[in-house]
Image (cartoon, rainbow, N blue to C red):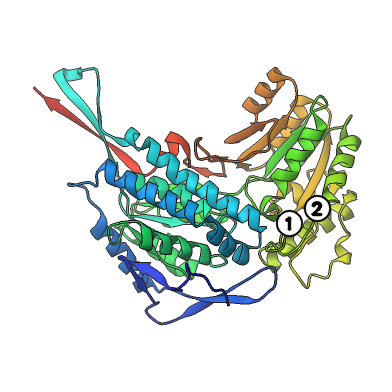
């Protein structure tokens, strides 16, 4: 079982106190690298979730809002606590998720960056008076907290995803009820331990409930005192949230699925493109919504680019993320492993060629380590083109023209992230403008940053996280004209 000074509690946190589930039930957490059970965590009931909402409602201040200075102090306190405990939080994250330790600790730094950004830019949420005086009135715009918010996060970035949401919610003065993924609740418990120990938050400002999504999600969707939900996860669940919250007309912030195109033109720096693809695709074992899922390479450089990728992939080390020198950890569960194997098998059966990796029938499936794999000869009919693989598979398709590859890149319901590699600046601008994706990297495979807005188009979501746009996500403008 896992031991840590940040995990002395394995239960929920409601109204400023650690709390067991009302019925005493728990669920188990496993290390995907070893298959070992590492914790038993409280599985909260609907009554517990209602208590958390009530605690948040008591913490909400509208007539006497928390000052900007107080909110800034909360954000700075969480930032500093994460920085000071990055190694231990990263270790916990590595053990329950499987990503390499250095990568896990880097995610803690990434998370701290969101609290830092919101703290430094919180003055943008201060009230301001219009210079104009229409209708002989003085007009002042205030930014009011939307209310108690439900924050629902996925397992692939256990600390990064909550940081995006919680930093903006606290900046706005919104209490929150937070549900982490059942695969990775321990990192969230560690965060709550840090907030409990080091940050002077009002009781009920942050509440932690863990357990069944069906139980917790139902309360958050139906409770009249939760006017907003922020969710990161599958488009399928996002669509359900739209339906389940429609009667109350809740505000939703949704970061949903992706199917990212990674486009390499003939004039691109192939070594730089290959390095960026490796960093982009295999982060988190390929289990990220922004990693390249469809790689389009100009036919004139396909063979050379494939060789460069194979050379890099064949040097990668797969193993337990706690071990030194590991580049790629395990997949999160058997379902994830089986999906990658199904996509590889489907592509090979339909005529794709194995450039690097192993044949699917050579893999026992007795563990969750899928080797990094590169395929060429991909077409739109293959499962890896239509679906998000969420694993260490690089499927390459050849293209001839700019128009053709824009059409192919957009041939998906998703629109989260895309990447374009070309030395031609005008071409890069044309292609980026033509791609219906919220994030388009030019000669870089980098994903989001705290300083810039991030979110999806089409079925990839609603709203933005990061940047000033994300800072405003949890407030509602209220306009007050004053007569003379």
- Compare residues 1 and 443 and report the one nearer the observer: 1
Mark 1: few/some/many CA within 10 Å (<14, 14-19, 20+): many
The answer to which image quadrant residue 126 occupies is top left
Outermost residue to the left: 484
- Circle 2 Cα neighbour tier, 10 Å, few/some/many (<14 / 14–19 / ≥20): some
| Secondary structure beneath label 1 | loop
Of the 4 image quadrants, the one containing the N terminus is: bottom right
Image quarter hosting the C terminus: top left
Give the camera-side residue of 292 and 99: 99
Q: Which residue lies at the image location 75% right of the left edge and 26% below the top edge?
A: 422
Q: Are circles 1 and 2 on residues that touch, CB within 8 Å? A: yes
Residue 429 in percent (x, y) is at 65, 22
Compared with 374, 12 (above or below) is below
Instruction: Determine the image quadrant of residue 412.
Output: top right
- Residue at figure coordinates x 36%, y 71% from the top left: 18
Residue sitting at x 83%, y 26%: 266
According to the picture, the residue beneath numbered tag 2 turns out to be 316
Q: Is residue 34 visible?
A: yes
Q: Secondary structure at mark 2?
A: loop
Can residue 472 be seen in this snapshot?
Answer: no
Picture quadrant where residue 91 is located: bottom right
Left or right, 66 with reference to 104: left
Q: Position of residue 337 (x, y in %)?
A: 73, 63
Compared to residue 124, the image places residue 362 above or below, namely: below
Residue 209 point in image, percent of width and height: 42, 67
Which numbered disc covers residue 328? 1
Between 88 and 288, the residue placed more toward the observer is 88
């Amino acid at each position: 079982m896992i031991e840590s000074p940040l995990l002395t509690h394995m239960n929920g946190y409601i109204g400023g106190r650690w709390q067991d589930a009302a019925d005493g039930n728990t669920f188990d957490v496993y290390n995907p690298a070893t298959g070992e059970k590492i914790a038993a965590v409280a599985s909260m009931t609907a009554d517990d979730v209602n208590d958390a909402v009530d605690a948040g409602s008591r913490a909400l201040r509208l007539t006497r809002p928390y000052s900007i200075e107080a909110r800034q102090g909360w954000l700075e306190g969480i930032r500093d606590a994460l920085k000071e405990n990055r190694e231990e939080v990263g270790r916990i994250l590595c053990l329950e998720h499987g990503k390499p330790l250095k990568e896990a600790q880097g995610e803690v730094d990434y998370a701290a960056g969101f609290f830092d950004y919101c703290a430094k830019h919180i003055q943008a949420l201060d009230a301001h008076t219009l210079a104009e005086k229409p209708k002989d009135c003085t007009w002042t715009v205030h930014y009011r907290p939307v209310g108690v918010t439900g924050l629902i996060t996925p397992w692939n970035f256990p600390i990064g995803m909550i940081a995006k949401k919680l930093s903006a919610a606290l900046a706005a003065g919104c209490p929150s009820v937070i549900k982490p993924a059942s695969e990775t609740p321990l990192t969230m418990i560690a965060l709550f331990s840090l907030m409990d120990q080091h940050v002077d938050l009002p009781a009920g400002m942050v509440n932690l409930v863990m357990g069944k999504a069906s139980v917790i999600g139902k309360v958050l969707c139906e409770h009249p005192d939760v006017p907003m939900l922020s969710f990161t996860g599958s488009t399928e669940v996002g669509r359900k949230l739209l339906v389940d919250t429609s009667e109350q007309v809740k505000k939703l912030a949704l970061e949903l699925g992706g199917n990212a195109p990674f486009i390499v033109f003939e004039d691109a720096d192939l070594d730089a493109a290959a390095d960026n693809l490796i960093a982009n695709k295999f982060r988190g074992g390929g289990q990220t919504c922004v990693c390249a899922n469809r790689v389009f390479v100009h036919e004139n450089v396909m063979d050379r680019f494939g060789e460069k990728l194979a050379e890099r992939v064949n040097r990668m080390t797969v193993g337990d993320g706690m071990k030194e020198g590991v580049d790629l950890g395990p997949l999160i569960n058997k379902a994830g492993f089986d999906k990658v194997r199904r996509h590889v098998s489907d592509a090979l059966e339909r005529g794709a060629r194995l450039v690097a990796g192993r044949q699917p029938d050579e893999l026992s499936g007795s563990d969750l380590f899928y080797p990094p794999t590169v395929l060429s000869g991909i077409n739109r009919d293959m499962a890896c083109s239509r679906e998000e693989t969420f694993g260490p598979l690089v499927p390459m398709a050849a293209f001839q023209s700019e128009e053709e590859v824009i059409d192919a890149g957009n041939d998906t319901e998703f629109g989260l992230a895309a990447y374009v590699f070309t030395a031609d600046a005008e071409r890069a601008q044309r292609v980026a403008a033509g791609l219906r994706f919220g994030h388009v990297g030019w000669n870089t495979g980098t994903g989001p940053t705290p300083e810039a807005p991030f979110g999806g188009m089409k079925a990839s979501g609603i709203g933005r996280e990061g940047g000033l746009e994300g800072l405003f996500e949890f407030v509602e403008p209220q306009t007050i004209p004053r007569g003379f």
